[in-house]
Amino acid sequence: MLFFVPIWVGVAVGPFLSAVTIVTLLAMATTSRSIELTAADALMAVLVFLLIGQYALKLTSLPSMFVAMTDWVLPFIWGRLILTRVHSGFLAVVLAAAATIAGTLAVIEGLTGENPFVGISVGSPTLHAQWGTLQERGGSIRAEGAFGHSIALGATLAMMSAFVLACRWRLWAKLASLVIIVAAVTLTLSRIGLVTLVITIALSLIVLPTLSRRAKWFILLAGLIAAVLVVPLLSDIFLSAGREAGGSADYRWDLFALFPLIPWFGSAADFSGLTVDGQYFGNFATSVDNAVLVAALRAGLVPAVILILIIVLAIVPAFRQRSTNAASIAVAGQVPGLFAVAFITQYATVFWFVVGLAVAGEVARRQAERASNAATLGEAVMRTADFAPTGPLIRFRRLASERSSGGEG
């Protein structure tokens, strides 16, 4: 659903609810709410309290609070709950398969210039006008699939590469899926997508315990071959894009000038016509391609810091080889991208779902570890009991000894 239904498809029930949000709510309703809570959950609860409180105090608008709830909070909760319904191994296979299909469609789009999703006009006309157009770079169409933006597709597929490597497919199937995903991300012509893809695959090769040494060497060799083929192609496209590609990079650097405008709590004031010390901020009013900055501008510095702490807690397992999980690796690989792309379209939902899944995966690992330790302790106790006298036998021997001692006296 996340990969194949555009963000503008949905219904208006007061605020507009995308099909992705509706499916998220339905999925949450079918899962158990009985979970082991963590520090990340406590931080998310604090964030929800702040979002509601800030709206009540008129520090932020209803649309800003609604977007934060539907794009950040709900997908996180879904990710936390889903392992109560399905096994992590099965979920990895589902995500890997969906990404492979989405990647195949993106490759077809990149080669033909045809995108069937932009023709879907059901839902919000405003969102369709914003996201339902194709992008170009250097005269080439940028693949975007159902995501409405090439960067959103590229970053999402980059995350999914960790699940491809973690799932229990045969090596040839993993390699075939990775080839498709690499080709699809390449055809998005997104530098962020490519960078996060390389980071995610590299982290997976280093810390993912389910990959054999043979598989790692095959994947590394395939990566080197892909680099030899892809780098010249992208160099030609980016050179032909010239000023547009360079201007995109400069624009992202200039965004950091907005940090002084961020309040501790609540949304930043309108800066569409603001000029400070000769710098005009109106150029950033329509687009801020920085997820951390957008969160801070929308909700305030303190809520943004809470979001960052939740992300940190989600990626910590990625750097512990014995306890890592694919979701933690996927989130860790996205860290550079968070400063170059906003939480747009389905990318926001996928990212926070995977953050919640990373936390859930770590909880599941700890529970399995405790169960294993308890089982080991139980086996040790049973083995000891097999060689030790039972309670009644000990009392009988003590009584016999006392009687014997009394008779001798």
Image: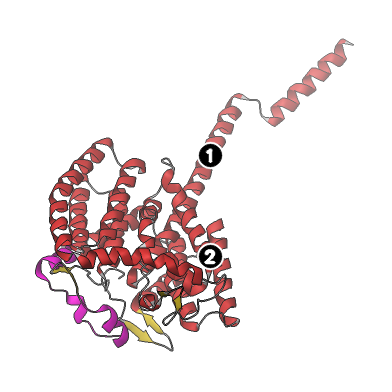
Give the camera-side residue of 87 and 339. 339
Kindly report the distance in space between the C-alpha atoms of the residues bearing marks 1 and 2.
30 Å
Q: Residues within 10 Å of mark 2 (few under 14, many from 20)?
A: many
Which quadrant would the N terminus be assigned to in this image? bottom left
**Among the 4 quarters of the image, the one containing residue 134:** bottom left
Q: In this picture, which residue range is highlighted in magenta?
A: 104-133
Disc 2 marks which residue?
A: 44
Give the camera-side residue of 394 and 141. 141
Which quadrant would the C terminus be assigned to in this image? top right
Q: Secondary structure at mark 1?
A: helix
- At 38% across and 61% down in the image, what residue appears? 338
Q: Is residue 282 visible?
A: yes
Residue 123 is labelled as none
Q: Amino acid at mark 2?
A: Met
**Among the 4 quarters of the image, the one containing residue 344:** bottom left
Lower position in the chain sequence, tag 1 or tag 2: 2
Give the camera-side residue of 246 and 182. 246
Question: Going by the image, does 108 lie left or right of 357?
Answer: left
Q: Secondary structure at mark 2?
A: helix
- At 31% across and 69% down in the image, what residue appears? 2
Q: Is residue 93 visible?
A: no
Q: Amino acid at mark 1?
A: Asn
Q: Residue 128 colored magenta?
A: yes
Question: Going by the image, does 34 lie left or right of 183?
Answer: right
Residue 373 is labelled as 1
| Image position of 256 with respect to 89: above or below | below
Q: Main secondary structure of the magenta part?
A: helix
